[in-house]
Image: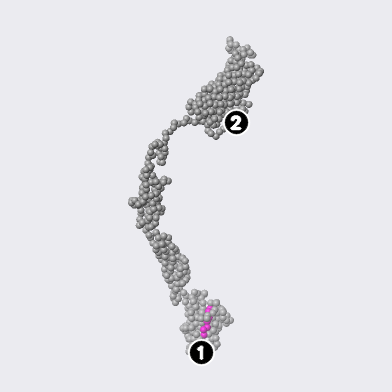
Amino acid sequence: MMRFTITTCLGALLVWTAAAQDQPKIETFLGYTYVRFYPANVSPAFSANGGRAEFVYNFNHWLGGVIDAGAVTNNNFAGFNINNTQTFFMGGPRFTFHRRSRFKPYAQAVFGGVYYTASTPVQGFGQPLIPPFLNPGVPVTASLVTSQTKFALAAGVGLDITLNHWLAFRPGAIDYYYTRIGDLRSIGDNSQNNLRYSAGLNFMFGGEKPAPPAAPQTKKCPDGTIVSINEACPKQNVSMSLVANPAELCPGDTAQVTPTAGGMDLSGFHNTWSVNGQPVSQGATFAFTGRDPGTYTIGLTAANDKFNPASAKTTIVVHEYVPPSGTVEANPSQIAAGDKSSITSRFTGQCGGPIQAARYTASEGSIVGDQFDSSTIQWDTSNNAEQRKTVTITAKAADNKSEGTATTQIEVMRKATAAPIRLPDVLFSKNSSRVNNCGKRVLLEQLRSYYERDSSGTVVLVGHQSADETAADLANQRVLNSAAVITAGTGVCLSIPKSQVQVSAPGTDQQGVSFDPGFCASSVTAGPSSEMRRVAVWFVPNGAAIPASVTNAQPASATTVGSLGCPK
């Protein structure tokens, strides 16, 4: 029952805890206690003396929780040798007033229990506790003991007088002290309405220390120095630097120079700007306009009544004008006739503004965008040997003031061209289209050797006749019979594809081609116009052009040569 009561009281105190911190936080009281007991039955009043201890936890400046414990004793009750002792243990709230004052009255109410014991000696009662032979001459005695635990409460006031931060003197505390102790006879009312008085020392922990003596009035100077309120602050030193934007410029451009002093505003200072040591301006900032090329030292001196003079310097470089210059490259730098090459260039300059994109020109050929095209270069068509030309590429790029030029070269190569090969003419007798043995030697031996070396070449046969021949279509028959010798593919005839044989029959028109009988001049009868009775033979290698004198030529596959077979 006593444990439940104390726990309930402490829980109620915790609910009342305030946010504000109390001073002191913990108090411990030790002192003397006097109790005057007033039983309600026929028992007489009596006094008891003892000691008392308290433990107090302060929740805030006015409310705390107290645990009250102690004991008192009396060894003479109503003239009888009765030794009675009461031990009490209680807890509850305490209300303190004028906490900030030296004199701190309080009121409290505590609840709990009391443990009561009473004993009296009895002579000759019962068996002796000590054998007589061990202590001869001493009468045999015994004690009658009774004890009980009962409810108790106390409510009252007290006064603490603070001596220093941790110690207070309690001259007195008076409580109404109520107990429920039954008398030995267990008759009548068991309630006791008692009066309790205590005095002693109170030890305090965690409290507020005495306020220190008032500090002299001071002020903090801008540099952090603490001086008396009437004392002047010492002058400060200013750490200053200059920032030029930009730090490099061209003649005529402007750079803004700004001082920095760790966030300090220098507008209230007396500022003197200089260029190469010569004063030029005053003010918070300075604008420097580019002059002749060179390096310039910009200086600033700043001071006022509260600061020591400070200075800083920076340099600005003024560059000279450099016109655009650069390089141009062709990739590849050597190409075949008709191919293309890519052109790239790089130009740099200074103080002339942005450089525009380069423009390209070529001494021959053409340029489209950044590519050189060699297809329009003119070559000597009469020269079938390899030909080379060097083309100069010029790149030009300009800034706001002038233009720069760069050149490179591209070598263009025209490969050697193959020329048609003229073989001896195949000769015919007058009014005959038969290919004789000498003519077959030209076609089957000499022409064959060229074809075997270049099987993709073309054979050109041109048939002629003289004006005094009377057979119809004689020139065409002569050229078809010649074509059959090299395309029939049977007997002694060759098997050159008909698509690689071009035939033409201009007749009496010799087309300006000279007569070339070769070793066959004696194979026919000589006479007037005999050199006109012929078939001109050409072997055109792959890549070479058909002779310009040949007109109206067509592939043998488009004629009736296939029906002739191999001529005998």
Protein image colouring? one colour
Vertical relation: 232 (above or below) 473: above
In the foreground, 258 or 204:
258
Nearer-the-camera pick, 477 or 444: 477
- Residue range highlighted in magenta: 501-507
Residue 315's x, y, as percent? Answer: 37, 52
Disc 2 residue type? Ala
Look at the numbered disc 2 and give the secondary structure of its residue: helix
On the image, the x and y values in percent for residue 449 come to 50, 77
Query: Which residue in the protein does label 2 denote?
Result: 12
Q: Which mark is residue 496?
A: none
In this rendering, which labeled residue sits more in front, label 2 or label 1?
2
* Amino acid type of the residue tagged 1 in the rendering: Asp
Mark yes or no: residue 554 visible: yes
The earlier-in-sequence mark between 2 and 1 is 2
Residue 468 disc label:
1
Q: Is residue 527 magenta?
A: no
Q: CA distance from mark 2 to mark 1?
A: 155 Å
Counting other residues with Cα less than 10 Å from the Cα at mark 1, is it few (<14), some (14-19), or many (20 or more)?
few
